[in-house]
Amino acid sequence: MAVLDVPLLFAFHFALALSGVLHLSVSNSTVSARQLSPSFPPTVLPTSRVASLPASAGAPAFVKPSSIHASALSSSFSSPSSSSSTSPSSPSSSAPQAALYQVGSALDAAASHRPAVQIQEAVVDGEFVNGKSVKEWKVERSLYQALHMALAEELARDPNVCVMGEDVGHYGGSYKVTKDFHARFGNYRCMDTPICENTFTGMAIGAAMNGLRPVVEGMNMGFLLLAFNQIANNAGMVRYTSGGAFDVPVVIRGPGGVGKQLGPEHSQRIEAYLMAVPGLKIVACSTPYNARGLLKSAIRENNPVVFFEHVLTYNIKEEIPLLPYTLPLDKAEVARQGTDITVLAYGKLRHVALDAAQHLEQLGLSAEVVDLISLKPLDMESIQTSIKKTGRCIILDESSRTGGIGGEIFTQVMENCADDLLEVPVRLATKDIPTPYAAKLEEATIVTPQDVVNSALWLVSKRGPTPTKA
């Protein structure tokens, strides 16, 4: 093992360049940082360890704090000359000669009522830093930040990737998923468009046919009904109607679903509309972890992908890997193991199902929650495995009950799992009315955890808990 110096840091440059945490430019006097993710504003890391840095040091490098969370870095920009902290190399310093870098300034510390953060020098042995593999490093991100990381990584990885939509550029997107991309990648790779969904969606499909990989952001997925012709007749069919001459690697993504008093036009659930369009893949993310991995895979997919993000999940937080990763687009995820009943859900309804499962556990019932993720095609293998174990099924659907996506899920469950079912599945969906604006009325139209609990109790009461199978 050896004490890390600047040349050794360069070995990690490419692997961590897509991580979305910090980009550090090292010189003989300062270590300057710029943000690659919306949660980390610019800062400067002063150091006086000039003797330990080679004269040629000037290339980008990356540093990982060994004893603090990355999000604890100073959040205000400060000049190296403004720091009044004692240098680690100063004879009066209480720290060892080669122990610490000072982050921020005394002025910043006084303003925030906390001492300046200190980053320990790391010890590197292959992929291990301070005894921990870089593959195990985690950072806390909300779902919108995870989407930001995925887009930033793919834009940096592939020059053919571009983003277009209303307010995605200088404004940073309606939910800040594309924040600062225009400054980093330019106005042509992060393009603001007029309020004309059919036009910019059609432009993205044409660009995809000619070798680019556009990501279209709908400010609200309901607005993309104005581009239904382009999505259905062009994106979904061009590969077939051209005899395979054209791929259409376009991603159409954005917020949707019933929010908090957004009114009927901003509460559309268009997944059922698109289910009937041949040639499309439909994905619904639900957590920061799967949002990042699925969006990266969707961008690399050569077929058109409609990528649903629920407006109420953007601020959900969890720790995700620091290094880039991808997830399969066609696989469901078992969010919670259970033995008595299977709950099939997607998007925000994953969290409704998990809440209900906690209540059912207190009542002595074990619910297995399966996050479908892929709405088209459905991962019937995972669904069959779960239903074979539990014998009962509840299907949660945020689209309208009549003609909703839950009807197709119900049909496929009956066709493929009839021999394993003890009871006919129960389908819970949004009421067949425009979503009201009034909070109490809005809540009365959507699926709630109590609805799931009541349905589960009713199903199990007919025959009792699932018998243990040998």
Image (tube, helix red, strand yellow):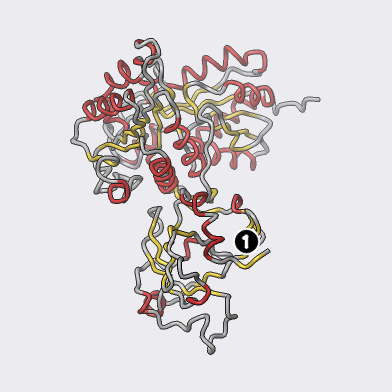
Residue 138, compared with residue 151, is above or below; it is: below
Q: Position of residue 410 (x, y in %)?
A: 52, 18
Q: Is residue 10 left or right of residue 213?
A: right
Q: Quadrant of the C terminus?
A: top right
Q: Position of residue 443 (x, y in %)?
A: 38, 37
Q: Nearer the viewer, residue 387 or 180?
A: 180
Q: Is residue 44 left or right of residue 379?
A: left
Q: Quadrant of the N terminus?
A: bottom right
Q: Quadrant of residue 257?
A: top left
Q: Nearer the viewer, residue 156 or 344?
A: 156
Q: Nearer the viewer, residue 323 or 376?
A: 323
Q: Position of residue 442 (x, y in %)?
A: 35, 36
Q: Is residue 49 left or right of residue 123?
A: left
What residue is disc 1 on?
124
Q: Nearer the viewer, residue 468 or 389?
A: 389
What's the residue type where badge 1 is placed? Val
Element assignment for label 1: strand
Q: Residue at x 66, y 34 (%)?
A: 338
